[in-house]
Amino acid sequence: MAAALFSVPDWFAHAMAYGIQMALVYWASLPSLGHHRSLVLGVVAAGAFGLVTEGLQYFQPGRTVELRDLEANIAGALIFCTMIVAAGRFGPWRQR
């Protein structure tokens, strides 16, 4: 097994993964739902997926359900949501 070149904290990995998931759901639903609904759908979908995956760990031997992981999942989705909103308001492509 190859050694990792670097390691990141578990909470950071959770936040990044679920933030990216939020962004992907947002961009996939944007053409049909519009900006605001896509933002809400992205955060809700990422949060729900995090809740389900954490809950399923209860039934898997050797795994534990951790509230901190769920918090990091939701925080990552909200951070990416904030970044998308900020990019729309302050980015070079903002609507005038």
Image (cartoon, rainbow, N blue to C red):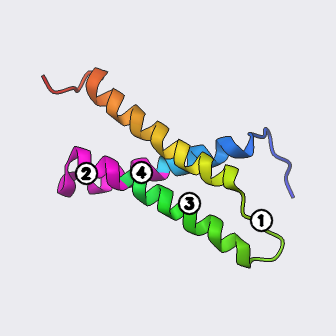
Kind of residue indicated by mark 1: Thr
Q: Main secondary structure of the magenta part?
A: helix
Q: Which residue is mark 3?
A: 50
**For this view, does 80 lie left or right of residue 3?**
left
Q: Which residue is mark 2?
A: 37
Q: Position of residue 46 (x, y in %)?
A: 47, 56
Instruction: Find numbered disc 3 in the image and state the secondary structure of the residue it sits on.
Output: helix
Considering only order in the chain, which callout, 1 or 2, is on the residue closer to the N terminus? 2
> Which segment did they paint magenta?
21-41
Give residue 64's mark: 1
Kind of residue indicated by mark 4: Val
Cα–Cα gap, marks 3 and 2: 20 Å
Residue 72 lies within the magenta run: no
The crowding category of the residue bearing disc 1, from other C-alpha atoms within 10 Å (few below 14, some 14 to 19, many at least 20), is few
Instruction: Find numbered disc 1 in the image and state the secondary structure of the residue it sits on.
Output: loop
Q: Which residue is mark 4?
A: 43
Q: Are discs 2 and 1 less than 8 Å apart at CB? A: no
Kind of residue indicated by mark 2: Arg
Considering only order in the chain, which callout, 4 or 2, is on the residue closer to the N terminus? 2
Cα–Cα gap, marks 2 and 4: 10 Å
Q: Position of residue 12 (x, y in %)?
A: 66, 41
Kind of residue indicated by mark 3: Gly
Q: Position of residue 34 (x, y in %)?
A: 19, 49
